[in-house]
Amino acid sequence: MKFNRGRRHRRNSKAEVDSGDMLSKLPGNIQACNGDRLSELPADVLLNILERVGTLDAVRTCILSKKMHRLPTMLSQIVIDLSPRDLFQKSDVVADVTNKILSRRPPQITIRKLKLKFVLSPPCCHSIGKSVGLAMATHKFDAAEFEILTPKDSHICTDDHRVLFADQFNNFVRDYPDAFAGLTRLHLRNMSFGESDIPNILRYCKVLESLSFFMCGAGISSVLHVEHTRLTELVISYCEFKRAKKSNWPCDESPLILGFVPQLSKLSLPQACLSRKTLNLSQLLANVPTVSDLYLEFRSEKVWIRPECPKVLAPVLTQLRSVSLDNLPEECDISWTMFLLEAAPSVEDLCITVWDHKCRKESQKSRSRKMDVHWEPSDPDFKHKNLARLTIYGFQSDDNFIGYVRRVIQAAANIREVSLHDRKVCRLCSEKFPHLGVRPSSYPRTSKEVDLLMKNMTAAATTSPDIHFCS
């Protein structure tokens, strides 16, 4: 359903953005065509229908009828989410439609959701900052979200561009503080911040619940310091924050500091954001024992987590329910991940992806640096009472995977489901790097192979989970 909606959105987007001032009157001969059945429905029914489509679709529908002309100003959800291509071509449309809807909106109608994707440009930021700021002061918002794209796409952004975009965004926040005061979700990309920028931004975003960085970073002597009383989700993707050695900072200190974030429940960290450092999870999560959903990405390179005793980790993982370890290198022994189960007794869902994704630029530079992680073996008598699901992408019929699944099943007293998938396939990997070849897969293909593996993995187990081979 989501995919189909996306296709319909792309098909209609050109007609939407080419309609100019979408709330202005059309020529009389077009307005006269308002006798269709849709416009004869009661207003509450029409609003219910319009809530199910994107705001630009709703506006485009309503300009065809005088009766429906004011309905967009009564929508409880205002979602403007054009594709990047359309957004770059017609960035003024988002600002224009947002301004007209919010400026004419009855103040007594609560805005349940405002979601705007727009380009970081002075005219667009000025219009949106002014209209949203005024609406924030006069209307009630349940949720408000900004996703800000930069004029230069990620693959052509230079360091100078990222510094410029960060400066422009900082000015945007300072010039229109009311627009950020009620923001609950913020997505930023292609920006290089100074060390004090993020704390300053978070002070303006008083009720922020979710913060996302994509292809962002900071200077070589900077650290990402996050502290916020309302933040529940932090996502860092393809970013790089570096810490230089100073007299009062050891060189191996984390470039990411999570301060007082008492509501943080979802944390997503890829390897790249940590500037290739090896870190202690117990230190990284020392101030956020509330995390329940943890996503760690390794980019098919070395494992950046240091070996730690489960007893040391246990105090910061008491609330953990879901763990995803993505893109572990294929030559890595995955048995080290047992430490997470030993340290986090409340985990219910563990997902591991093992994949040498050659498309990753950094993986080509660091293939020789990949290495196994040397951890102490897990306690053979260890039992886990809450793990219900184990999912592995990249499963192979070798001792590494078979032994791991058998060990988890033996330890997890109440496990219900084990899903084992073959390696992921990327067409671009083979096209860009044909000289590297593809490792032959040992994933089971016949019922005989499956039966033999299931018998092997459940040997000496006290539970009988459903094991699915999902090739």
Image (spheres, rainbow, N blue to C red):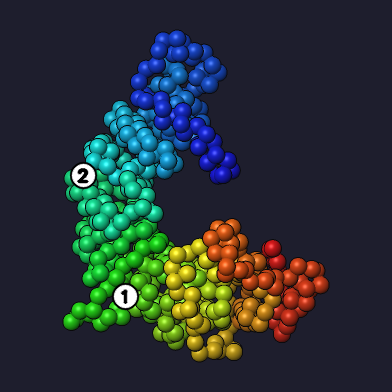
Q: Is residue 428 left or right of residue 304?
A: right
| Quarter the N terminus occupies | top right
What label does residue 176 carry, if any? 2
Residue 70 position in % (x across, y down): 38, 23
Q: Nearer the viewer, residue 84 or 133?
A: 84
Query: Visible in this render: residue 308?
Result: yes
Dot 1 surroundings within 10 Å: few (below 14), some, or many (20 or more)? many
Dot 2 surroundings within 10 Å: few (below 14), some, or many (20 or more)? many
Element at label 1: loop
User: Residue 216, relative to residue 452: is it above or below?
Assistant: above
Where, by quadrant of the figure, is residue 259 drawn? bottom left
Q: Nearer the viewer, mark 2 or mark 1?
A: 1
Tell me the CA gap for discs 2 and 1. 33 Å
Residue found 38% across the figure and 36% down from its top: 89
Instruction: Residue type at mark 1: give it.
Output: Ser
User: Residue 84, relative to residue 461: is it above or below?
Assistant: above
